[in-house]
Image: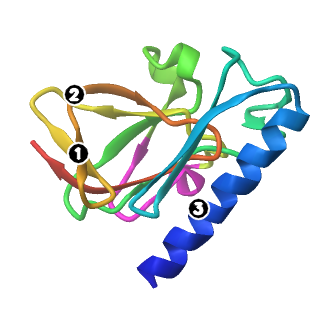
């Protein structure tokens, strides 16, 4: 099952990278992490074809809280991530859709805490950007 998910994610990244030059952007790279994350970065600071909150109106960011003990703070507006009005809280087992966030733009790791993304990458305290088309699965939160 993990292999199938990794292949599906890699194919989606390839399709996204192939679509970007047609939109006037140059892909710098596509990264697949543990079959759960996909990120496409462009040479431009902002994507050329942004419709609403998501790239092309459909390729959105999302975060899954797979930790079974702790809640996780997310933001639906990266530019206003320091304002509590953009925050939502994911309980264990929830993702952005559960709290009515179509496009998750980042997640917060509290001071003295670390999170595991997928099964092998850890992130420390602070805000972490979630790019459009990127699905982040937090599998462990340790404080």
Confirm whether the magenta stretch covers residue 92. yes
- Is 91 one of the magenta-colored residues? yes
Q: Nearer the viewer, residue 101 or 31?
A: 31
Region in magenta: 89-99
Query: Which residue is at a point 44% across and 37% down the rendered structure image?
Result: 74
Query: In the rendering, at what x and y percent does residue 79 appear?
Result: 56, 15
Which dot, 3 or 2, sits closer to the camera? 3
Q: Residue at x 46, y 64 (%)?
A: 35
Q: Mark 1, residues whose alpha carbon is within 10 Å: few (<14), some, or many (≥20)?
A: many
Which sits in the foreground, 92 or 9? 9
Mark 1 vs 2, N-terminal side? 1
Q: Quadrant of residue 49?
A: top right
Q: Residue furthest bottom?
A: 1
Spatial distance from mark 3 to mark 2, Cα to Cα? 29 Å
Q: CA distance from mark 3 to mark 1?
A: 24 Å
Residue picked out by circle 3: 10
| Residue where numbered disc 1 is placed | 115
Q: Are circles 3 and 1 on residues that touch, CB within 8 Å?
A: no
Q: For mark 2, give the secondary structure.
A: loop
């Amino acid at each position: 099952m993990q292999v199938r998910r990794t292949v599906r994610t890699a194919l989606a990244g390839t399709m996204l990278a192939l679509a970007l030059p047609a939109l006037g952007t140059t892909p710098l790279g596509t990264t697949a992490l543990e079959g759960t994350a996909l990120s496409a970065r462009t040479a431009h600071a902002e994507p050329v074809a942004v419709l609403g909150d998501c790239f092309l109106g459909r390729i959105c960011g999302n975060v899954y809280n797979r930790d079974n003990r702790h809640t996780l703070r997310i933001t639906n507006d990266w530019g206003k991530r320091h304002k509590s009005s953009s925050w939502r809280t994911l309980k264990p087992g929830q993702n952005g859709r559960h709290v009515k966030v179509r496009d998750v733009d980042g997640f917060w790791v509290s001071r003295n805490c670390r999170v595991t993304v997928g099964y092998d990458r850890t992130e420390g305290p602070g805000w972490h950007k979630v790019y459009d088309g990127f699905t982040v699965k937090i599998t462990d939160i340790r404080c």
